[in-house]
Amino acid sequence: MRAVIQRVSEAAVRVDGQVVGQIGKGFLVLLGVMESDSLREADVLAGKIARLRVFLDDAGKMNLSPLDIGGEVLVVSQFTLCADIKKGNRPSFTPSAAPEKADRLYEYFMTKLKDEGVKTVEHGVFGADMKVSLLNDGPVTICMDTDTWLKK
């Protein structure tokens, strides 16, 4: 699994002009599910994101996680994070999971975030044409790939 995590003051996702997910202070997570991913990757990634310490403490240091501040998380599925760009200039998306598998792991990932203690987990609409807006706080943007912790 691959994720781009942005620390935000607020974020929202719209489908057909309607807000389908919206948060205040927390993380916007763009999530890409690879064909080789399983529940194990979702478990690890949800834990890492829930405990990612990039919010400021009283001393002004990035030392607090969303769990510490009551932060919210907005998760948006994004198969383009799985792009293979080794050859040429047109990305190949063959590494991304088939839609049925990707949707199942996307839903599972959001459940795991709640299991980890994140109280508010909002989301987009899987497979839809979404418009994402955010106010990046910092800016702070972190990229994660479960291959960092789990060798395949």
Image (cartoon, grey):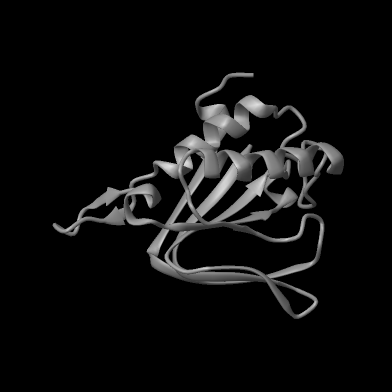
Q: What residue sits 60% from the left and 71% below the top?
A: 12
Residue lying at the far top in this picture: please name it.
152
User: Could you tell me if residue 33 is visible in this image?
Assistant: no
Q: Position of residue 42 (x, y in %)?
A: 61, 34
Which residue shows up at 52% across the image and 41% down it? 144
Q: Is residue 144 left or right of residue 127?
A: left
Q: Position of residue 29 (x, y in %)?
A: 56, 53
Which residue is depicted at the point 56% across and 22% down? 150
Residue drawn at 64 percent across, 19 percent down = 152
Residue nearer the viewer, 94 or 120 = 120
Closer to the camera, 100 or 96? Answer: 100
Front-most of 13 and 107?
107
Relative side of 29 to 48, left or right: right
Q: Position of residue 94 (x, y in %)?
A: 83, 38
| Outermost residue to the left | 59
Q: Quadrant of residue 125?
A: bottom right
Percent x, y for residue 145? 56, 36
Q: Based on the displayed image, in which of its 4 quarters is residue 70 positioned?
A: bottom left
Report if residue 15 is visible in the image: yes
User: Which quadrant of the figure contains the N terminus?
Assistant: top right
